[in-house]
Image (cartoon, helix red, strand yellow):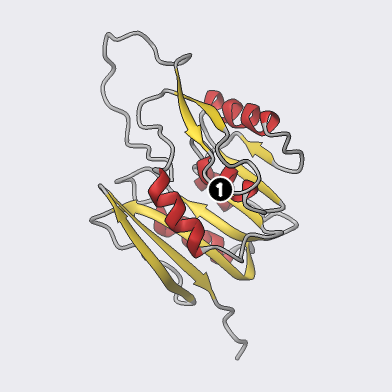
Amino acid sequence: MTRRRPSSPRSNKPSSRNRQGKLRIIGGDHRRRILPVLDKPGLRPTPDRVRETLFNWLAGELHGAHVLDLFAGTGALGLEALSRGARKATFVERDPDVARAIEANLTTLDIQDSRVINTDASSLLQGPAPAASFSVVFLDPPFRLNLAAPCCTALENAGWLTEEAWIYVEVEASLTPDVPANWSLHREVRAGDSHGRLYYRKMVPYA
């Protein structure tokens, strides 16, 4: 759940490219580890309270999971999932500096079986699905760009999901995302200007 808003006009302030913030892993094997994250406009870790709520919902579903963290940003959700028992994670992040920062944090935590894809998440979903589908997906697109619905459609229709996948969708509080009919809303949480919903995918029976 890394919030990215559409770009604002440039200012005369010094570049924040090399400044850093902090990300705290809050549960699992890497609990309390503090990791650096780049200090860039619109980039911040998911608040601890929201992450704790989400991962309480997912308790029992993460062991051995194959996780997809779209629009990964700081990678907070994917890293938390790995700490709590996910087998591997794929992070998708368009900004090359931010993608390298996630890779560095994976190295710091000595996580081997995960990777970062430096590309646009929406474009990736329009391409071929991976050989192995994902059982847990985190989808947190930028606000006000209407990306959630087409991403959900692509996840459902193009073979990205396991038969009983869990999908967490984070959008602006004023928007109710349009999701596939076989996704059942499990839980939801409101935090500031965002609204998170956890869906459970049910297979559509063949006619």
Q: Nearer the viewer, residue 141 or 27?
A: 27
Work out whether 158 lies above or below 78: below
Q: Which residue is under mark 1?
A: 27
Is 121 on the left-hand or right-hand side of 108?
Answer: left
Picture quadrant where residue 113 is located: top right
- The residue shown at (61%, 65%) is 61
Q: Residue 106: where, in percent of width, then height?
A: 66, 34
| Quadrant of the snapshot with the C terminus | bottom right
In the image, taking residue 37 as reference, residue 10 lies left or right, namely left
Using the rendered view, name the quadrant where residue 155 is placed.
bottom right
Residue that appears at 62% across and 87% down: 206
Q: Position of residue 201 (x, y in %)?
A: 54, 72
Where does residue 146 sit, x and y in percent of width and height? 34, 51
> Which of the two residues, 29 or 78, is positioned nearer the viewer here?
29
Residue name at image x 42 percent, y 72 percent: 185
Q: Is residue 179 left or right of residue 103?
A: left
